[in-house]
């Protein structure tokens, strides 16, 4: 009973926190109460999503808590909240605007990522990492202010009390010694709120209280953050039907979890053009496995189902295949089938190709599919070859296909292990490294066309063949169409108390 009682008391203290967000670090216990434009709504969400994706990439590429990982997270943090990250707290107006952006963007993504267990798990994991990084950057004064603002009654013990238990504190952990203990602040915390540290035997216990050094306080705070955000995400998913009242907002939230935030590949490359006759050679050298699989199936069967034609056709458009060359490429291959002649191709397939290039129907200039879209939507059926091979292919079949591409057994084992653990894009990066014989690609793959550009650059295509020049880009800007309409975010975020921590 004592365990439950202390937990209830801790949650009660948090629920009593009614302050507006003023500290640079937040528990996000209160939803925003203001109007913002749809343009800002989407921009805030995209900017925060870039941070979480950046943290994900850093943790996948580097060892956790390594200097390289810290540097990558610091980079995306400074891009998102530059003044807060630099601790330039004298610039009050800029800091206030960044706190506002941080606050609103968290709640937007909370709504976008509460729709399924997988999305909730992903959002919770990387929000925790973001919070942990920011907490560790705080000054001792900033931490004390944060604890006070959130009614977390963790107070450093006085020096005389610390001196009286100095020996016990030294023996409480291998990390403590006679030199470090006097220079550290220790907090007295109910031991039921420090169970993770108790399990690791890192702290001193006395009379039901845990004496936690400031360096380990983040473990307790993260535990509180995780428990409350996890509960809020589960409850928020039950409030989603209220969003159906406004058809402007729900589609934006639904698309955020599949949002691609890199370079825009909808426009034809500014330099050079790929010809129909170039595709075979490029496929062998520079296509990601998903597109190589589609190309091989097309050459073997002289046909692709609609999902395959969309995924592969838009990819070819993105690498520089013009409409005229696309019609030639698809016509030459499809008419090799005894069931399709030129007339049938023109009637059944040519329209869709022109449609993808914005020459038919609504004249929409369709964008090549990103990795996230391929992974999360339209899974392939029995006769299909589209999708992500690392996500949609059986492990044994994936292993067989990788070996047929000339990869080593050890490399194949690494890739299949990554795919088994749902690290599909990291598996693609490993595939890239093995195919191109590089030890560290130095980038994360978020788009098949990005793989192609990096491959062309690695192979030196920008020097030897001016038709295939690729310029390196970082995280691209995301353009949105401004609606000019204002929406009351509070209508959605505060309509139910369950959206609060």
Image (cartoon, rainbow, N blue to C red):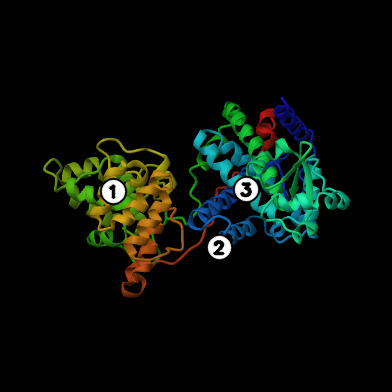
Q: Is residue 112 above or below residue 497?
A: below
Q: At x 71% / y 56%, what residue is drawn?
A: 176
| Mark 3 Cα-neighbour bin, 10 Å: few <14, some 14–19, many ≥20 | many
The answer to whether the residues at label 2 and label 1 have Cβ atoms under 8 Å apart is no
Q: At x 64% / y 33%, what residue is drawn?
A: 232
Q: At x 73% / y 55%, what residue is drawn?
A: 138
**Mark number, residue 44:** 3
**Mark number, residue 68:** 2
Residue picked out by circle 1 = 399
Residue 370 lies, in percent from the top left, at 42, 49
Residue 246 lies, in percent from the top left, at 59, 31
Left or right: residue 282 compared with residue 209: left
Tell me which numbered mark, 3 or 2, is placed earlier along the sequence.
3
Which of the pair 104/121 is nearer the observer? 121
Which of the pair 310/412 is nearer the observer? 412
Question: Circle 1 — which element?
Answer: helix
Left or right: residue 274 compared with residue 231: left
Left or right: residue 454 compared with residue 113: left
Q: Residue furthest top?
A: 1
Q: Quadrant of the C terminus?
A: top right
Tell me which numbered mark, 2 or 1, is placed earlier along the sequence.
2
Q: CA distance from mark 3 to mark 2?
A: 27 Å
């Amino acid at each position: 009973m004592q365990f439950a009682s202390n937990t209830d008391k801790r949650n009660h203290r948090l629920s009593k926190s009614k302050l507006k967000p003023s500290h640079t670090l937040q528990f996000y216990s209160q939803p925003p109460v203001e109007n913002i434009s749809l343009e800002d709504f989407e921009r805030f969400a995209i900017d925060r999503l870039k941070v979480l994706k950046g943290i994900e990439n850093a943790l996948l590429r580097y060892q956790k808590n390594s200097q390289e990982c810290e540097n990558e997270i610091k980079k995306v943090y400074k891009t998102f909240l530059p003044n807060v990250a630099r601790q330039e707290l004298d610039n009050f107006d800029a800091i206030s605007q960044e706190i506002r952006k941080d606050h609103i963007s968290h709640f937007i993504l909370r709504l976008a990522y509460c729709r399924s267990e997988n999305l909730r798990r992903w959002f919770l994991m990387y929000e925790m990492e973001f919070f942990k990084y920011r907490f560790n950057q705080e000054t001792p004064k900033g931490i004390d202010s944060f604890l006070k603002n959130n009614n977390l009654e963790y107070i450093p013990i006085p020096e005389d009390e610390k001196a009286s238990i100095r020996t016990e504190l030294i023996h409480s952990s291998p990390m403590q010694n006679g030199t470090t203990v006097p220079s550290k602040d220790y907090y007295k915390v109910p031991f039921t709120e420090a169970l993770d540290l108790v399990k690791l035997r890192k702290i001193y216990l006395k009379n039901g209280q845990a004496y936690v050094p400031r360096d380990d306080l983040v473990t307790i705070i993260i535990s509180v953050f995780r428990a409350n955000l996890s509960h809020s995400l589960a409850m928020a998913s039950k409030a989603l039907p209220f969003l159906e009242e406004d058809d402007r907002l729900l589609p934006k939230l639904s698309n955020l979890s599949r949002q691609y935030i890199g370079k825009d590949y909808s426009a034809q490359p500014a330099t050079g053009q790929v010809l129909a006759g170039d595709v075979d050679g490029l496929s062998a050298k520079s296509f990601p496995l998903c597109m190589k699989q589609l190309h091989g199936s097309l050459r073997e069967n002289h046909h692709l189902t609609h999902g395959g034609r969309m995924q592969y056709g838009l990819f070819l458009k993105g690498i520089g295949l013009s409409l005229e060359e696309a019609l030639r490429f698809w016509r030459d291959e499809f008419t090799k089938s005894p069931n399709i002649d030129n007339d049938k191709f023109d009637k059944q397939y040519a329209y869709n190709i022109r449609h993808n290039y914005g020459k038919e129907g609504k004249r929409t200039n369709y964008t090549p599919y990103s990795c996230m879209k391929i992974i999360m939507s339209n899974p392939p059926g029995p006769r299909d070859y589209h999708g992500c091979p690392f996500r949609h292919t059986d492990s044994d079949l994936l292993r067989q296909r990788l070996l047929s591409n000339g990869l080593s057994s050890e490399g194949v084992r690494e890739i299949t292990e990554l795919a088994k653990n749902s690290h599909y894009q990291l598996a693609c990066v490993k595939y890239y490294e093995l195919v191109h014989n590089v030890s560290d690609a130095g980038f994360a793959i978020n788009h098949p066309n990005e793989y192609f550009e990096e491959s062309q650059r690695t192979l030196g295509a920008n020097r030897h063949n001016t038709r295939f020049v690729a310029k390196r880009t970082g995280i691209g800007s995301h353009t949105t169409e401004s609606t000019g309409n204002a929406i009351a975010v509070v209508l959605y975020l505060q309509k139910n108390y369950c959206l609060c921590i």
